[in-house]
Amino acid sequence: MNLKDFIRSIKDYPKKGILFRDITTLIKDEKAFKETINQIVERSKKVKFDKIAAIESRGFVFASAVSYILEKPFIMLRKKNKLPADVHSIDFELEYGTATIEVHKDSIEKNEKVLVIDDLIATGGTAEAAAKLIEISGGKVACFVFVINLFDLNGSDNLIKKGYKVENLIKFPGH
C-alpha cells in the first residue's frame, strides 16, 4: 500500500504560499490508518525507549494507537494553557508564526528515553521544541517518528545534524 496515495494536498492553507499535506484523508481510511500505525510500530520496535510523546494535536492520533499496541506510557505535548498541572514551556517559531508547547513537569523522569511521534515535519521547529521540553524534563529523545517528511524544508536533516535519530514513513516536497 502506498500511503502517499491517501494524503490530500491543499494549496494556500493555512496561509497563502503554504501547501498543506492533509492526513485526514489517510486516517479516515481504516486500511491506510492501520498500515500507518503498523509501520510506526515496526520502526518503534527497533528503538529502546520508555515512553511515547506526541505533539498536539495530529500527533496524538498516531501516538495513542502506538502507545496502546506497545504498552508504553503516553505523554501529551500540548499548546499553551491546555495542561492543568505545573508545566515546562518552550516558545518556538513555525513556518507561519510562533507558538508555545508545554509538558507536565511530572511526565518524564530523569534519563527516561522518549519516542516522539508527529504527523509531519517541515522545518523542524516544533520537533526541536519538543526535544527541548523532554530534555529540560530530564529525559532524552530516543527517536522521532514522522508520518510525513517535507524533505525540501530540511527539518529531518536538521534534527539528524543535531544528533537525533529520525524515521519518516512518507516523503513529499514542501512546495
Image (tube, rainbow, N blue to C red):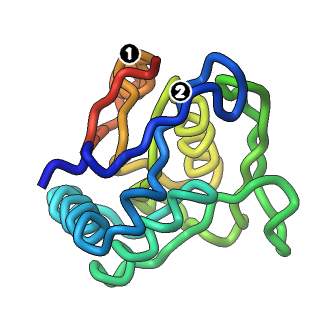
For residue 103, which quarter of the picture? bottom right
Binning the other alpha carbons within 10 Å of mark 1 as few (below 14), some (14 to 19) or many (20 upward) gives some
Vertical arrangement, residue 159 with respect to residue 87, above or below: above
Q: Position of residue 37 (x, y in %)?
A: 28, 67
The kind of residue on which mark 1 rests is Asp
The Cα–Cα distance between marks 1 and 2, rounded to whole angstroms, is 13 Å
- Decide if residue 120 is on the left or right side of residue 85: left
**Residue at point 23%, 50% (across, down):** 3
Q: Which residue is at 28% across, 78% downward?
A: 70
**Front in this rendered view, residue 172 or 93:** 172
Residue at image x 72%, y 26%?
A: 15
- Is 125 placed left or right of 93 in the picture? left
Q: Inspect the image, locate mark 2, and give the three-letter code of the amino acid beneath it.
A: Leu
Q: Is residue 69 above or below residue 61?
A: below
- The residue tagged 1 is 152
Residue 19: which disc? 2
Q: Nearer the viewer, residue 69 or 22?
A: 22
- Residue at 42% across, 57% down: 25
Tell me the element at label 1: helix
Dividing the picture into quarters, in which one does residue 120 lie? top left
The percent coordinates of residue 1 (x first, y second) are: 12, 55
